[in-house]
């Protein structure tokens, strides 16, 4: 890792896969710790770290020895880290594939999907991951048909070989050989196979039985050609790490007389049919999951589906809780269930949510108690009379406290009241005439009731009682007061009759004058024509001399 | 008179034209008398008409007298026409009213300005020379000059 890289990002060169050995699955950690190659590598490293060598060659040899040990250790750690990742991926894919789709019932209701234990077991078994052998076995045991067909002897060997033999024996097929098992595993990247001991909590008769398993860096098991999915009502969602194939039906009796095809040879690991079709399973046992008997949804792809629906979480929790080593996952799912559970609700065994018995009554009682309601002996509820009385008293006190600071406007007059006392009034327009007859509009402030000069809450004296023009105290009209100054705030809004008549008469005269001007101009034109004629008739060349023929 | 000339055999085209001009002049002169008499009284007596006739230009006046009186009457007519035209111009720029027009007109212009316009060059020169001899005359010349400038500035002589 480059020292300046983001420390929060996983180191791509971390042989543990970026998680550290402590975060590995317990089975992976146990296998890693029991791997003899790890002990050998660590021994090489310890020997190489010894000091006190006497010759340079010995020191060089020790350094080389330490380097080889460290390289081998890192390589093994990386392989186990990849195995851990593949295991987690396979487990997650198996869980995802075991989740069905919501089913619409004929009555219109929607049934939440049930956890498909058979699909889960098939996915684990199909992953060919030796770490998941125990979990696949446990998952198979949850399926009634498989559990009825198995024996205790089949369950004794928890190695891959033993598991495969038990599986084949249960299905009436010849047991597979270790070579077939080895051929089914992806080819390791190196020639050195990884020997994985059985988990510590698994019975391992005969001691540690090393098996050839998947190479962490090899191709995923899903590289094998997937077979068609059996026609179940709700097939599990295919995932890259899940190999599904058609499985012939298992007899309803669960006996071993199953006409299943034998294991195939070659590079593909034989996956004998294990589970009967849903119809056979339904007739075989009453414990068949509901999802297999429910009608298929009309369109399971329409609309989004919940990511964490409670029924699925419940099924996951049941699976995790019954799976060894899955306590942390179970606790995580349980936390999700608790968070998704509404207040007052509880999760039923089928994943549905129901109200907790007595919760509604408790809430009702709390609400009534909060409202100060009491229950009468006859069962009716009534509120404490003191509550209404107290509320009324509180509201009245608040209104009374706000009144001195409340401004209101009374109409007509536009009187502004503060606390019910007039403090201001807009001037009122009063129409009238001047002594000369001109119309006027006077704006006055009528006297207001109340005590004059009483300080208002704002500290200003009340304007009531101010002197000024009021209706009734206007100056009396008299002949001598024609030219007297008008009262304050009095505006002449028109002409007095004399001025108006004078201006009207003058306007008429001006118009007559203008008309006379035009008439005079016309007469002047005519007169000028006459004069011009006379000038011509008496001028030179007229043939007569003016004054000569005068009387 | 014409029958007399015709009987004496001294009638000619020139005398006929002179006689026609004289007769037309007399008729037009009578129209002036009629207009002036109507202005004085709608029912004027003969004496009134005779008195008015003697006050108006007629054939008994000399050539110079006719010229003077014609110029004066023409100046009055020009003055009236210009005043009517100026009144309409005033109305357009004073809220469609003639308020103040008459005082403004009388202050700036009089018929004298139009008389000057009508006078012949020799008569105007003689008049100006005579007015320059006295103070009152010089004041009148100054007023006439101001009025003629006002009339010319306001286009009152355009139609003459």
Image: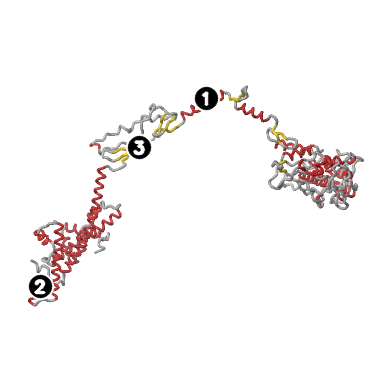
Q: Are discs 3 and 2 less than 8 Å apart at CB? A: no
* Side (left or right) of A264 relative to A293: right
Residue highlighted by disc 3: A429
Q: Quote the CA–CA distance across marks 3 and 2.
A: 91 Å
Q: Quote the CA–CA distance across marks 3 and 1.
A: 44 Å
Q: Secondary structure at mark 1?
A: helix
Q: Are discs 2 and 1 less than 8 Å apart at CB? A: no
Residue highlighted by disc 1: A393
Q: Nearer the viewer, residue A231 or A361?
A: A231
A467 lies above or below A117: above
In terms of image quadrants, where is residue A306? top right
Total count of labels: 3
Residue highlighted by disc 2: B2
Q: Which mark is residue A268?
A: none
Where is residue A456? Give x, y as percent: 42, 29
| Chain bearing mark 3 | A
Where is residue A45? Give x, y as percent: 86, 44
Visible residue check, residue A421: yes
């Amino acid at each position: 890792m480059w020292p300046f890289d983001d420390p929060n990002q996983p180191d791509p060169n971390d042989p543990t896969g970026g998680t550290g050995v402590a975060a590995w699955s317990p089975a992976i950690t146990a296998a890693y710790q029991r791997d003899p190659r790890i002990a050998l590598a660590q021994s090489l490293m310890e020997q190489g770290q010894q000091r006190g060598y006497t010759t340079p060659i010995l020191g060089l040899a020790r350094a080389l020895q330490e380097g080889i040990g460290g390289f081998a250790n890192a390589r093994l750690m990386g392989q186990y880290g990849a195995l851990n990742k593949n295991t987690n991926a396979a487990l997650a894919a198996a869980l995802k594939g075991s989740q069905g789709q919501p089913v619409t019932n004929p009555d219109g209701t929607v049934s939440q999907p049930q956890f498909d234990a058979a699909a889960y077991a098939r996915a684990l078994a199909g992953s060919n991951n030796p770490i998941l052998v125990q979990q696949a076995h446990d998952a198979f045991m949850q399926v009634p048909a498989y559990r009825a067909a198995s024996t205790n002897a089949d369950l004794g060997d928890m190695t891959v070989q033993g598991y495969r033999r038990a599986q084949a024996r249960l299905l009436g097929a010849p047991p597979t050989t270790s070579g077939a098992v080895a051929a089914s595993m992806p080819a390791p990247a190196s020639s050195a196979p990884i020997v994985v001991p059985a988990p510590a909590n698994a019975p391992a008769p005969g001691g540690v039985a090393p098996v050839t398993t998947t190479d962490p860096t090899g191709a995923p098991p899903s590289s094998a050609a997937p077979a068609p999915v059996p026609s179940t009502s709700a097939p599990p969602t295919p995932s890259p790490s899940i190999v599904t194939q058609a499985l012939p039906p298992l007899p309803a009796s669960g006996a071993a007389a199953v006409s299943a095809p034998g294991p195939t040879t070659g590079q593909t690991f034989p996956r004998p049919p294990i589970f009967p079709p849903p119809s056979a399973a339904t007739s075989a046992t009453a414990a068949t999951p509901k999802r297999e008997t429910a009608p298929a949804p009309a369109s399971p792809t329409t609309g989004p589906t919940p990511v964490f629906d409670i029924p699925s979480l419940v099924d996951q929790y049941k699976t995790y809780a019954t799976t060894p080593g899955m306590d942390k996952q179970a606790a995580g799912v349980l936390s999700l269930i608790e968070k998704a559970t509404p207040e007052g609700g509880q999760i039923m065994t089928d994943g549905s949510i129901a109200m907790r018995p007595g919760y509604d009554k408790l809430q009702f009682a709390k609400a009534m108690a909060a409202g100060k309601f009491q229950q009468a002996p006859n069962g009716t509820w009534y509120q404490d009379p003191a509550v209404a009385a107290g509320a009324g008293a509180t509201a009245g006190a608040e209104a009374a406290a706000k009144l001195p600071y409340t401004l209101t406007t009374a109409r007509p007059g536009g009187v502004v009241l503060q606390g019910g006392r007039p403090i201001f009034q807009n001037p009122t327009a009063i129409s009238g005439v001047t002594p000369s007859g001109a119309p006027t509009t006077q704006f006055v402030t009528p006297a207001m009731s109340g005590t004059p000069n009483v300080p208002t809450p704002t500290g200003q004296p009340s304007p009531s009682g101010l002197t000024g023009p009021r209706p009734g105290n206007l100056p009396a009209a008299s002949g001598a007061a024609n030219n007297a100054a008008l009262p304050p705030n009095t505006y002449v809004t028109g002409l007095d009759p004399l001025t108006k008549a004078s201006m009207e008469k003058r306007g008429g005269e001006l118009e007559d004058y203008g008309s006379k001007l035009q008439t005079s101009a016309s007469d002047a034109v005519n007169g000028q024509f006459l004069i011009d004629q006379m000038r011509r008739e008496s001028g030179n060349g007229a043939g007569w001399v003016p004054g000569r023929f005068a009387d | 008179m014409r029958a007399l000339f015709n009987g004496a055999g001294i009638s000619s085209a020139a005398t006929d034209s002179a006689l026609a001009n004289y007769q037309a002049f007399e008729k037009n002169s009578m129209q002036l008398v009629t207009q002036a008499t109507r202005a004085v009284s709608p029912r004027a007596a003969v004496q009134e008409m005779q008195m008015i006739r003697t006050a108006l230009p007629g054939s008994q006046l000399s050539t110079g007298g006719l010229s003077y009186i014609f110029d004066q009457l023409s100046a009055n007519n020009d003055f009236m026409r210009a005043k009517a035209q100026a009144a309409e111009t005033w109305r357009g720029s004073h809220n469609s009213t003639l308020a103040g027009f008459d005082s403004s007109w009388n202050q700036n212009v009089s018929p004298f300005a139009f008389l000057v316009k009508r006078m012949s060059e020799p008569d105007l020169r003689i008049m100006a020379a005579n007015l320059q001899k006295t103070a009152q005359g010089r004041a009148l010349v100054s007023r006439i000059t101001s009025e003629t400038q006002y009339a010319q500035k306001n286009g009152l002589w355009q139609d003459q």
